[in-house]
Image (spheres, grey):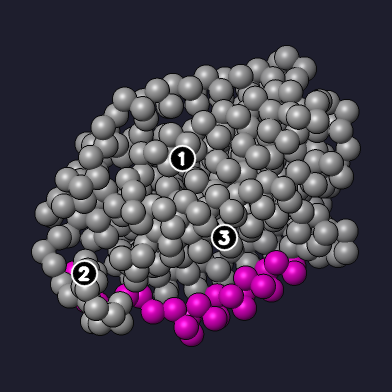
Amino acid sequence: MGMGVYTDYFIEALGLTRTQLSLAYLVGTLLSAFCLPRAGRLFDQHGGRVMIAASSVLLALVLIYISQVDRLLALLSGSIAWAWLLMLLGYFGVRFLGQGVLTSASRNILLIWFVKRRGLVSGLRGVFVSFGFALAPLAIAILIHDFGWRGSLWVMAAGLFLFGCAAWLFVRNRPVPETAVITLPETGSENEAPRETGLKGMTLAEARQRPVFWLYAASLSIHALFGTALTFHIVSIFDQVGRSSAEAFSYFLPSAICSTLVNLLAGYLADRNPLKPFLILMLLSFLVGAFGLANLADDWGYWLLAIGFGAGGGLWGVLSNLAFVRYFGTKHLGEVSGLNTALTVSASAIGPAAFSLGLDGSGSYLLPVYLCMVGLVLLLIWAVIHPAPERTMGQYKG
């Protein structure tokens, strides 16, 4: 999400157009998505400790590389083609290692460790994720102001390297042998030893045959598409309706507050309720936010955007954490969630390019916004009519 803050800096440093940069983002992200299911299998094989530590350090190296792209371009021919390829490689690294491997591994390891209070734990995690996603553009803008765009990347790279070292020292893969699913006792202390059960969960091939997988994957992906496009073009979108860049970045604070509150409440309630109502509420929230975006010139449109996307983002955090482990178990969680991550990452690649092309073709962002609203309505209808019986899905024996 935070890479969108650098859009105008990259355009100026490399001489690319907005559409060319968006297409580099699209191709780099799609290439990363093809690799993510394999990364999910590596998580199943090696655990979260290795994946979190390795992806953090490698992501730090990618950020250092991106900070030097203009200098590398000067050593090459300086052509637009080279500039495009250099940014494609950088976007590939950020999307694969950051939103892909690191995000999935950190989520999955918590789902393996906690069972009885998964929803609450996911909600607590979501507090940090929601604030991180929503405030990252604002925090990065501050870093750029203090250190310049190149220096801000170095600061984040140093933080990632330290985080990777801490993950290697302190993260542990799981509290029970890998062959078992953790089940806490129904009574007594939660500190009692977990016991093994025969429930292994569905394989990726089996999960793909279930319509509920595609319902949740598509619903999570449309937020990735829409939300990433909004963040990537945030300054330009606000400028289109006569709002300043300061107003554009100020949007993230109320959105983050709303997202965090909804995430924590929904995470607590999800332990006691099926996920379908949360899915419906998420799609409705994004529709409200999209309607606000279409009327951003008005103050009420600004607040609908902040509240709608904030609440939807909070619910998105809960569903992305719980849906696949609840329906398909933990045995193949890395691979199953890896496919979902690949789909959401692919969608996030399409969003910025689609909005750029919409701007080029029509002179505004309204056409892609309306198309996203149509997609949200169709998904909402599907969510309402689909039964999604969790109690039978989660009991599948592999």
Q: Is residue 177 left or right of residue 360?
A: left
- Residue occupied by mark 2: 186
Query: For the view shown, which residue lies furthest in the front direction?
Result: 187
Q: Which residues are magenta?
A: 154-180
Q: What whole-number distance in Å separates the C-alpha atoms at marks 2 and 3?
A: 27 Å
Magenta span dominant secondary structure: helix
Crowding at dot 1, Cα within 10 Å, few <14 / some 14-19 / many 20+, comes out as many
Q: What secondary structure is found at the residue carrying circle 2? A: loop
Q: Is residue 62 left or right of residue 324?
A: right
Labels 2 and 3: the sequence-earlier one: 3
Labels 2 and 1: the sequence-earlier one: 2
Q: Is residue 96 visible?
A: no
Q: In percent of the image, x 56 and y 33: which residue is there?
A: 286
Q: Nearer the viewer, residue 85 or 346?
A: 346
Q: Is residue 12 magenta?
A: no
Label 2 close to label 1 by CB (< 8 Å): no
- Residue occupied by mark 3: 127
Image position, residue 128 (x, y; %)? 58, 62
Crowding at dot 3, Cα within 10 Å, few <14 / some 14-19 / many 20+, comes out as many
Q: Is residue 278 visible?
A: yes
**What's the residue type where badge 2 is placed?**
Glu
Q: What secondary structure is found at the residue carrying circle 1? A: helix
Query: For the view shown, which residue lies furthest in the bottom direction?
Result: 169
- Residue occupied by mark 1: 220
Crowding at dot 2, Cα within 10 Å, few <14 / some 14-19 / many 20+, comes out as few
Q: In the figure, 89 relative to 245: above or below? A: below
User: Residue 365 falls in which quadrant of the image?
Assistant: top right
